[in-house]
Amino acid sequence: MNRPWRSDPHTLAGAYALDALAEADQISFERHLTGCEACRQETDGLREAAGRLAAATAVAPPPALRAAVLAEAARTRQSVPPAGRARRSPTDRRITMMLPPRLAVAVAGFAMLLALAVGALTVNTAHRLGLADARGNQIAAVLSAPDATMMRAHASDGATATVVMSHAEHTLVLTTAALPALPEGRAYEVWVMGAGWAHPAGLLPAPHNGMTAPIVVPALGAGDRIGLTVEPSSGSAHPTGPPVIMLNLPA
Amino acid sequence: MAWPGDRPARPRRPSDSITDLAALLAYVARGDEDAFATVYDRTSATVFGLVRRVLRDPAQSQEVTQEVMLDLWRTASRFDPGRATAMGWITMLAHRRAVDRVRSQQAAARREHGRPADGPDYDVVAEEVESHLDAERVRRCLDSLTELQRESVTLAYYSGYTYREVASLLGVAVGTVKTRMRDGLIRLRDCLGEQ
C-alpha cells in the first residue's frame, strides 16, 4: 500500500503538530521522526507555533479547581526521569542541571578546580595572553576569598559545571567539563538571570580536552542565577533559546 | 569580546518570561509544590481555555484540566528545553489530552451537529486573560493565513478534527489539507516569530 506520507513524509508534519493524525498515522509518523532529525526539528517548530494558538482561547478556570489540583498533586507520586533521555542528535543536545544549595567547599575539591582552571588556562594562554592576566587576578581574588564556596552540578550525560563563588567579592568563577559539542558558528553564552531578565556575562571559550577555561562573572546580586544558552558564536544581547543549564546560587 | 566587567545596570523586565517558566518546571520536576502552584497560576487559564475550546463542555473541561495539571506534575522531568518552550510543552500536554477525550467520548455526538464555527470563539475569550497582547498577536497572525490554511489549522487545533475529517468537512482533497496545515503553521510560526 502506498500511503501518501511515504512519498513525502514532510507533508504530514503540520497535521502531526496539530494532533490531527488518527492513531495509526501518528504511530507511523513518529516512527519516521525517530530516524529523521530534520523532520523532528521542523515538527518541534510547528508544534510550538500550534501551541501559541492556545493564547487566543485562554480563560481562567473556576477558582475551586486550584485547590483540588494542588491537593491531588500532593498525593501523587512523580515519575522518575526516563533513563534514556539522551536520545538526541549531537547538534541538539541540551542539559538542565540545578546546583544544590550551599554545598560546603572541600579543600580537595578546591585544589582540583584550581588545577582544572589553571590547566585550561595554560592551554589557552597563547592566544589570549592579555585577557588571561586580568582574569587570572580576578580568579585568584575569588579563589582566595575567605568565604569562597564551591558548587558542582552533574548532568545525566556526564557534563559538569563547577562554580566557585565569593559572596564578599560578589563574583564567581565558572568552568565546565564535557558539555555537548556545538556545531560551527554556535557557542555557549553565560547569563546572569533573575525573574524575567537575563544579562549577558560572556561566551564560554572553546573547550580543550572537554573543559572550558574559567569564566569570571562579577557583580552578582542575592538570588541571581547563572544560565547557559546556545547562541551564535558572536554572542546575543538576549537569550534566544531556552537555558541549557541553570545554576541557582545560594542567596 | 565583551567581558562582563563593564556591563551596565541590569534591566528589570516583567517576570513572566518563558525562560522563567522553564526554570520553574525544573523545580516541579524535583517535587517542589510551591513551584507547581506558581506554574498552575501562570498556565491554568491557557490550559483550561484550550481544553474548553476543544471539548466545549465545562464540567469535562475542568476534569481534563485537572488531568493535564497532574500530567505536568508527574512528568515535569521529561520536559526537554532543547525541544520546546515550557509553555509549548504544557499546551502540548493539554491539547493531546483534550483531543484524546473529544475523540474517544464525544466523536459520535459531535458529528451529529455538523460543522462547527470556524476559528476560536473570540467572544468567549476571557477578560482575565493574562496576556491580551499575545492573544491579539495570535489573532492577527491567524488573519494573515489564507482562508483554507486558517480553516484547516483551526478545525484541527480548536475542534480536534483529524486532517481526514477536516478534508471531508471542507470538501477538499486530503492531500490539500495536509499541505495547508503545514503551510499555515509555517506562516503562523514566521508571523509569531516577528516579535
Image (tube, coloured by chain):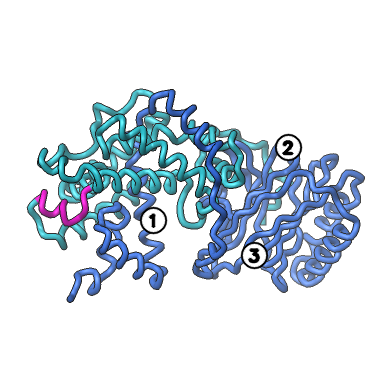
Q: Hue of chain B?
A: cyan
Q: Is residue B158 above or below residue B164?
A: above
Q: Answer whether residue B144 is visible to the viewer in this image.
A: no
- The amino acid type found where label 2 is placed reads Gly
Q: For residue B83, which numbered disc appears in the image?
A: none
Q: Residue furthest front?
A: A75
Question: What residue is shown at x 57% (from left), y 67% (from top)?
Answer: A182
User: Which residue in the structure is indicated by mark 2?
Assistant: A221
Question: What residue is shown at x 47% (from left), y 29% (from top)?
Answer: A68
Q: Element type at marker 3?
A: loop
Q: Residue furthest bottom?
A: A1
Q: Residues within 10 Å of mark 1 (few under 14, many from 20)?
A: many
User: Which residue in the structure is indicated by mark 3?
Assistant: A179
For disc 1, the chain is A
For disc 3, the chain is A
The earlier-in-sequence mark between 2 and 3 is 3
Q: Is residue B64 left or right of residue A134?
A: left
Residue range corresponding to the magenta coloring: B161-170
Quadrant in the rendering for residue A108: bottom right
The residue lying toward the viewer, choosing from A115 and B57, is B57
Q: Residues within 10 Å of mark 3 (few under 14, many from 20)?
A: many
The residue lying toward the viewer, choosing from A59 and A64, is A64
**Most common secondary structure along the magenta stretch:** helix
Q: Hue of chain A?
A: blue
Please report contact status of discs 2 and 3: CB closer than 8 Å, yes or no: no
User: Which residue in the structure is indicated by mark 1?
Assistant: A45
How far across and how far down the image is residue B149, in percent? 20, 50
- The amino acid type found where label 1 is placed reads Gly
Please tell me whether mark 2 or mark 3 is closer to you in this view.
Answer: 3
